[in-house]
Amino acid sequence: MESDVELLARLRNGDEEAFVMLVDRYQQPMLRLACSMVSNQAVAEEAVQDTWMGVVRGIERFEGRSSLKTWLFRILANRARSAGSREQHQTPIESLHAVDPLRFDAQGQWADPLDRWTDESDDRLDAATWLPILKTGLDELPPRQRQVVMLRDIEGLSGDEVCAVLGISGGNQRILLHRGRTRLREILEAELRKV
C-alpha cells in the first residue's frame, strides 16, 4: 500500500488514480468526523465533498508541516463548522458530564478497574454486541467530546493533531478526551452489570 506522501506526489503530478486512492482511504473517516460536527447527514456529506474539492484546488499549497490526514481533517473541520453554523445546536450546560476525581489514583489511572472486563473479556466481549452500545454512547456525548474521542480513539490522531484539526488547546483536548472516555466507560460498566 502506498503511503500518503507517495500518493500526494502522484496527485501533484495530476494522477487521478492517486486521488481515487486517497478518497477510498479517507472518505469514511472524514464522513464520521463531519457527522459528529453537524446534525444532518446531507450537510456532512456536502462538507466532505467541499473538502475534496478544496484539496484538488489547493494541493499545491500543502506544505507538509502536518500529515496529509491532519490537513484533510482540518479543512473538513473548517467546512463542517461553516456548514453547521446555520444549524447552531447548542449543548445545555446540564448535559455536560463532570468526572469524579475519586475514580482515579495518584498516577491518574482508574482506581477501580473493570475486573469483570479484564477477567472475562474473551467470554464477554462480542463485537457485534458492544459496537452498537459504544456507537450509541458516542452519539450521546456532547459534540466536542465526541469529536475528540473519534479523532483520538477511532482515527488514531495524536493529541497535537486533534488540537490542530479542531483549533483547541492541548488542555482542552485532554479534558474533552477524558470526559468522553469516562462517559463511555460508564456506559460499558452499566452494560456489564446487566450481564
Image (cartoon, rainbow, N blue to C red):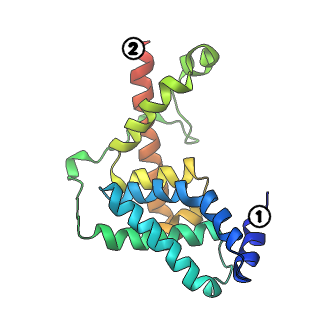
Q: Quadrant of the N terminus?
A: bottom right
Secondary element at tag 1: loop
Q: Residue furthest front?
A: 16
Please state which amino acid type lies under the numbered disc 1.
Ser
Secondary element at tag 2: helix
Q: Nearer the viewer, residue 106 or 194?
A: 194
Pointer 2: what residue? Answer: 194
Q: Position of residue 4 (x, y in %)?
A: 72, 67
* Side of 90 where 150 appears, left or right: right
For the point 53% across and 23% down, the residue is 114
For the point 67% across and 84% down, the residue is 63
CB of mark 1 within 8 Å of CB of mark 2? no
Q: Residue furthest bottom?
A: 61
For the point 61% across and 53% down, the residue is 156
Mark 1 vs mark 2, CA separation in Å:
44 Å
Please state which amino acid type lies under the numbered disc 2.
Lys
Pointer 1: what residue? Answer: 3
Q: Position of residue 135 (x, y in %)?
A: 43, 38
How many other residues sit within 10 Å of disc 2, few (<14), some (14-19) or many (≥20)? Answer: few
Vertical side of 10 occupied by 89: above or below: above
Q: Nearer the viewer, residue 120 or 17?
A: 17
Q: Let me know if residue 165 appears in the view.
A: yes
User: Could you say which quadrant of the image residue 137 lies in?
Assistant: top left
Q: Position of residue 129 (x, y in %)?
A: 48, 23
Q: Quadrant of the C terminus?
A: top left
Q: Let me know if residue 67 appears in the view.
A: no
For the point 60% across and 13% down, the residue is 123
